[in-house]
Amino acid sequence: MLTDLKVKIGPQVYRYHEGAIDFVPTVLAEYQVKRLLIVHGTVSWEKAQPKMTFLKSLPIEIFYHRYTGECSYYGTELIEKIAQEKEIDFILGVGGGKLADLVGYAAHKTNLPFGLIPTLASNCAPWTPLSVMYKESGEAEGKTEHYLRQAAFLITDPTLVIDAPVDYFIAGLADTLAKWIESEAILAQPHLQDEPFLQMAGYTAKLCETAILSQSKQAIIDMEQQEVTDAFCHLSEIIIAVAGMVGGLGDKYARNAAAHAMHDAISKYLPESHRFLHGEKVAYGMFYQLALEEKWAAIDQLLPFYQELHLPMSLHQMEIYPKDEQVIDQLVAFIDSKEKVHLIPVEVNKERLKEAIYALETYLKDV
């Protein structure tokens, strides 16, 4: 029996349907909120406000803070200061993944409950009790803050989520597919196969993979046509919520491995990678992990999906391959430092990690 498994299922309340945002005041009343801080972005906030009509009639004090655009330690300090000065007792985040991460970490630092209204489906940040940290410049800090606090609620509306750039949705599909790619080999190990929560994590990761590979094309078409269909609702829900449950059930055994470690590495050491979305960098990271595991047949099977969604496959294709080999060494050293990469049941050391970078570039040279 595992003694190091920390199960953190997800938000206490979850609703995702047309009109769901009208339920937010009910949850705020449950928490007896008197002084609410709303952290928001710019464009997303303009789109969300019309669906938050309850703000005009809530019998509480409401304060507003537009975040800087990054989940940073500086941004966290700004929220901490406001929370202290205004005696805030609840934080509500309205926006995308970085904002969700920022609000979660700020709530952890201020010991306050928080809720989230995601405005797009690009990752599972609203579900997970962790925050990927960046500098204000957009460069990754190379570290993730984990905490035990979970959202009081995750509530949003597909008619809001569908009104976002399609590129973010596609990136979210890739980021969610990684739940299966990163956890499959780890969870398949004999000593982990009888663990109930890990079995649930594996089933959930497989659900993500099956739905994304079979329904993405239709869901993207529906989003482009602004039609809130079952295909769009189901896949956006899988991105925002179900994907987060994989790591919530499986903890380190089903959270991040080499694909996300590579994302963090290129975000930290290749500034030119900043033009790619989180999920796009993870898409390359998935192929990297499969190369590390020498699963070339799996790469072949995924190639049509990647090509159809125009997902990044190699550093050369992304036009960010470093000319200086020392940068490759930095990437490798960073990836090697991540504990969860070493849970993959293959030989993992700096030499093998470096070989996998070169092998993948060579394998995809003519694709």
Image (tube, helix red, strand yellow):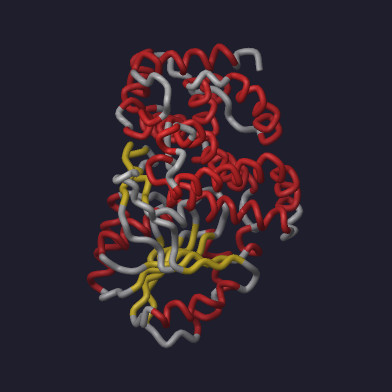
Q: Quadrant of the N terminus?
A: top left
Q: Is residue 342 above or below residue 66?
A: above
Q: Is residue 31 left or right of residue 188?
A: left
Q: Is residue 106 above or below residue 270?
A: below
Where on the picture, by quarter, is residue 19? Answer: bottom right
- Give whichever of 169, 209 is nearer the camera: 209
Residue occupying the point 67% across, 39% down: 213
Q: Quadrant of the C terminus?
A: top right
Residue occupying the point 37% across, 78% down: 31
Residue occupying the point 38% across, 66% down: 65
Q: Is residue 9 visible?
A: yes
Q: Position of residue 189 (x, y in %)?
A: 45, 32
Count the marks: 0
Q: Position of residue 226 (x, y in %)?
A: 73, 57
Q: Is residue 182 above or below residue 215?
A: above
Q: Is residue 135 left or right of residue 301?
A: left
Residue occupying the point 37% across, 60% down: 103
- Give whichever of 307, 127 is nearer the camera: 127
Q: Is residue 357 above or below residue 50?
A: above
Where on the picture, by quarter, is residue 17? Answer: bottom right
Q: Is residue 350 left or right of residue 222?
A: left
- Give whichever of 114, 186 is nearer the camera: 186
Q: Position of residue 315 (x, y in %)?
A: 51, 22
Q: Position of residue 87 (x, y in %)?
A: 26, 75
Q: Is residue 279 visible?
A: no
